[in-house]
């Protein structure tokens, strides 16, 4: 066995713990899970010294005792949520347990004797990486899990979730079923998540109401169709952002990544006569505000070649707004979208409404790579986008994008923002 400590990183509900169980099952080993969420006492990991009242071994040795074997698959859940205070730093105590060079003589304070952990297969899980301390992260082999696409959620629900929910509600297969249209309706309009937990809850809600109808002898069996989903779940909760219906000046489709997947983000800009400069609204984070500065400076420094008079900047104030102001937005990947929308209002040129874009931009106009390309392009496809501009350096990530998305959207890799401006703006009068 290779001395590898795996770390599964991804949003909630994508099946990180389930994969750990499956690994144990396929290896024929015992499976032990210890949750580290909220642990902020070093003694929880290493154990208390026996001189203390209520002393006990740490979670590692308790888990080994529970497994009853020397080589279990040991899952340390939520390793990114460890705390630290005056009682010590639990993440520092984990260093010895997870280091293949040291863990053959792991010493628990309660036992006071070295114990060999080198045969244990450790798997850790986390939602985010940046809260895991550097020395601990260095010992982990990171495996990233992205959120599921609509098609993946549909197949998971069809093959597993509906059967689990049916059994939980005490229903037979003949008594309760959902049509494909109804299932897609629940996925698209009643859940917004990366995993499938909320989807299972919504299907369970329908199943419980069907069980009640059958128990009250209102009906003998129910086949839920798309048009009847709202009878069980109420009005739709999630409305997809669709592209605009016509080309407009000062409105661009940006592509954003969120923990629940990708989204199309409209960015607006409008000119008002007054003092030169710009205003930004829409609850933008620091990184995105800096992207606005870089985009504004690029447009000013290349005004002449973009057909903008220098006077336009002196006498006009530009307001940039990202709608859905209650939702925080951050990251550098809106750079080319911001450059395009600022150019559009100053040059008075319309932006094609069928186009979406993502990419960080530098002051020289170079387009830098971004993350979450798969989710962003799936969101663009859902919104009906026909063309998507992506950074040239992200071409390698297209292997992960579903074939249907690549077939329906013309994906244009670009190295410089001028390529985007040439094709996304309508320059002819």
Image (cartoon, rainbow, N blue to C red):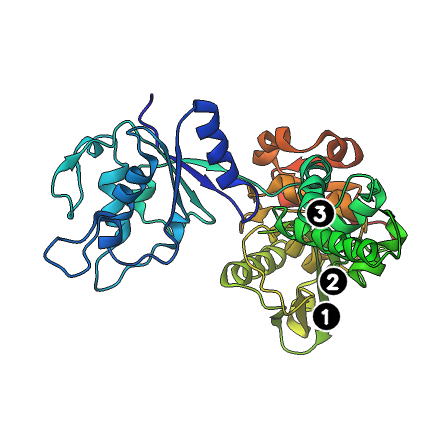
Q: Quadrant of the N terminus?
A: top left
Q: Secondary structure at mark 1?
A: strand
N-term-proximal mark, 2 vs 3: 3
Q: Residue furthest bottom?
A: 274
**Residue 384 makes an appearance in the image:** no
Q: Secondary structure at mark 2?
A: helix
Comparing 249 with 227, the one in front is: 227
**Residue 359 makes an appearance in the image:** yes
- Residue 100 at x, y = what percent? 25, 31
Q: Which residue is mark 2?
A: 345
- Residue 51 at x, y = what percent? 9, 57
Indicate left or right for 222 with 144 as reference: right
Question: Are discs 1 and 3 less than 8 Å apart at CB?
Answer: no
Indicate left or right for 238 with 303 as reference: right
The label nearer to you, 2 versus 3, is 3
N-term-proximal mark, 2 vs 1: 1
Total marks in image = 3
Label 2 environment density (alpha carbons within 10 Å; few <14, some 14–19, many ≥20): many
Q: Residue at x 33, y 56 (%)?
A: 39
Q: Quadrant of residue 344?
A: bottom right
Q: Which residue is mark 3?
A: 170
- Residue 396 at x, y = what percent? 58, 30
Q: Residue at x 46, y 35 (%)?
A: 20
Question: Are discs 2 and 1 less than 8 Å apart at CB?
Answer: yes
- Residue 120 at x, y = what percent? 31, 30
Q: Which mark is residue 271?
A: 1
Query: Marks 2/3: CA distance?
Result: 60 Å
């Amino acid at each position: 066995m290779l001395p590898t400590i795996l770390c599964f990183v991804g949003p909630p509900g994508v099946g990180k713990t389930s994969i750990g169980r499956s690994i144990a099952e396929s290896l024929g080993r015992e499976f032990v899970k210890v949750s580290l969420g909220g642990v902020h006492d070093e003694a929880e990991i290493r154990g208390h010294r026996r001189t203390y009242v209520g002393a006990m071994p740490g979670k590692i040795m308790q888990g080994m005792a529970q497994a009853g074997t020397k080589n279990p698959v040991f899952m340390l859940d939520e390793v990114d949520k460890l705390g630290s205070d005056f009682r010590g730093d639990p993440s520092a105590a984990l260093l010895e347990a997870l280091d293949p060079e040291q863990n053959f003589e792991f010493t628990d304070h309660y036992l006071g004797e070295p114990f060999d952990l080198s045969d244990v297969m450790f798997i850790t899980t986390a939602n985010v990486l940046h809260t895991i301390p550097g020395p601990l992260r260095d010992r982990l082999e990171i495996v990233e899990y992205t959120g599921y696409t609509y098609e993946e959620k549909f197949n998971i629900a069809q093959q597993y979730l509906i059967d689990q929910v049916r059994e939980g509600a005490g229903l037979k297969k003949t008594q309760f079923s959902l049509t494909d249209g109804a299932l897609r309706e629940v996925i698209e309009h009643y859940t917004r998540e990366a995993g499938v937990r909320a989807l299972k809850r919504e299907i369970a809600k329908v199943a419980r109401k069907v069980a009640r109808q059958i128990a009250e002898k209102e009906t003998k069996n129910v086949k839920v169709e798309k048009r009847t989903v709202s009878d069980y779940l109420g009005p739709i909760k999630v409305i997809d952002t669709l592209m605009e219906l016509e080309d407009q000046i000062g409105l661009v489709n940006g592509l954003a990544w969120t923990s629940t997947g990708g989204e199309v983000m409209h960015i607006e800009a409008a000119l008002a006569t007054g003092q030169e400069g710009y205003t930004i609204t829409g609850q933008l984070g620091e990184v995105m505000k800096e992207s606005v500065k870089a985009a504004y400076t690029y447009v000013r420094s290349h005004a002449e070649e973009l057909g903008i008079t220098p006077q336009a900047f002196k006498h006009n104030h530009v307001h940039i707004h990202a709608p859905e102001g209650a939702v925080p937005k951050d990251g550098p990947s809106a750079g080319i979208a911001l450059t395009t929308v600022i150019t559009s209002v100053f040059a008075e040129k319309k932006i094609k409404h069928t186009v979406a874009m993502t990419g960080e931009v530098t002051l020289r106009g170079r387009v830098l790579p971004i993350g979450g390309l798969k989710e962003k392009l799936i969101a663009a496809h859902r919104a009906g986008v026909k063309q998507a501009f992506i950074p040239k350096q992200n071409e390698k990530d297209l292997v992960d994008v579903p074939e249907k998305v690549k077939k329906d959207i013309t994906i244009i890799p670009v190295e410089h923002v001028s390529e985007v401006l040439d094709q996304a703006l309508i320059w002819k009068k």
